[in-house]
Amino acid sequence: MAKEDVLLLDFWVSPFCSRVKIALAEKGVAYQQRGEDIFGGKSELFLKSNPIYQKVPVLLHDGKPMCESTNIVQYIDETWPSPPLLPSSAYDRARARFWADFIDKKLFDAGGNIWKTKGEDQAAAKKELIQILKYLEGGLGDKDYFGGDSFGFVDIIAIPLTNWFFAYEKFGNFKVEEECPKFAAWTKRCLGRESVAKTLPDPQQVFEFVSMMRKMHGIE
Amino acid sequence: MAKEDVLLLDFWVSPFCSRVKIALAEKGVAYQQRGEDIFGGKSELFLKSNPIYQKVPVLLHDGKPMCESTNIVQYIDETWPSPPLLPSSAYDRARARFWADFIDKKLFDAGGNIWKTKGEDQAAAKKELIQILKYLEGGLGDKDYFGGDSFGFVDIIAIPLTNWFFAYEKFGNFKVEEECPKFAAWTKRCLGRESVAKTLPDPQQVFEFVSMMRKMHGIE
């Protein structure tokens, strides 16, 4: 695989881009990345590659574009099969896709509702986030990772979103670890993995980015 | 495969349940179905099988529950491989999953916004629905079906939702066929297929169900 065959259109703080980077790192796939100016002039390649959503990440493989991070991670798993990210049985794959979809539907939006609000709305948003994490703790059960003994698909979908928790905690004045210790232990386990540790930005920088977003939204 | 191995927890008018029924019909899988009283007393099996969403469809295969229709259709495709519903190449599968996800995110909610509203809100909802269908026409291109020459995954995800269009048209006073003739032609093509024709309820009955829902929402 020549390096120029795989190109990621990226934005540094996006947890959705981080999913793709972690998956590519797990597979040992070399790739190029190009930062997109998502607030300013989006590149022609980007707009052509994702005309409907105009969102990062976009992965171009041999020039062919793919959009939506969960979809891209599945593509990566099917295209470079070793090591496998999704489980081998159809039932376990259905369970994994269920949790990935649950995370996609719930987690980032719930976090956004914490930093975008104050007072009662923020209290409700915190309660909602904790409920989501309790459900995820149920999915995790007594396993080290969502798929069992080894880091896999659902872990890759979930872990980059936890990188924003420091910002949620600062603006929401709570601690995920106190509310959901099992989820926090899973987070630490994943952060010890090289593909994750090398990919995720510093939570302090994420906090500063969220602070800027709050100002843009007129919240401060 | 003994008939009692596959059980669908169902609600007659749900387009999401219809997806599962069409997929099982395409695969020639015999199954039992049990109607859930989604407005009344939900069964213990149902609540135990889908505790998070408490939504139909649920498919139980050898007693193991699966939730979320798009996920279930993928499971069916992986478990009973012939005839295949998803395309054979990883890139084409990524395209198919992209469109299935787009439909899941957009189409049913946009339709709901037509029958739940009036006046300017309804006009905006109709515009939104038509924009979604235009995007889908782009995805269809010049092909007979979303995957090419044969009826497949994206067709199964999309076609049951069109069964509600008669109700949207009656309440919204417009015609999908006039706005999106290519999409309407695809719809007719799919409706000619036995697995689809035998599964979908009469659009008049869907209209009556939506009328009842409007009354429940205090719209009439």
Image (cartoon, coloured by chain):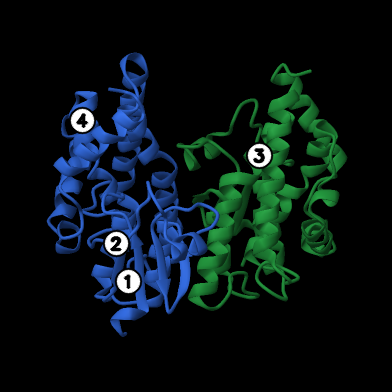
Chain colours: A blue, B green
Amino acid type, callout 2: Gly
Can residue B156 be seen at all in this image of the molecule? Answer: yes
Amino acid type, callout 3: Ala
Q: Identify the disc placed on residue A152.
A: 2
Disc 2 vs disc 3: Cβ atoms closer than 8 Å? no
Dot 1 and dot 3 within a common chain: no
Placement of the C terminus of chain A among the 4 image quadrants: top left
Residue B46 in the image: x percent, y percent?
A: 55, 39
Q: Residue pushed farthest front?
A: A41
Circle nearer the viewer, 4 or 2: 4
Question: Residue drawn 53% across and 36% down?
Answer: B54
Q: Is residue A144 toward the left or the right of residue B117 in the image?
A: left
Dot 3 and dot 4 within a common chain: no
* Residue carrying label 3: B110
Disc 1 vs disc 4: Cβ atoms closer than 8 Å? no
The local crowd at label 4, few if under 14, some if 14 to 19, many if 20 or more residues have their Cα within 10 Å, is: some
Circle nearer the viewer, 1 or 4: 4
* Residue carrying label 4: A169
Q: Is residue A64 toward the left or the right of residue A20 in the image?
A: right
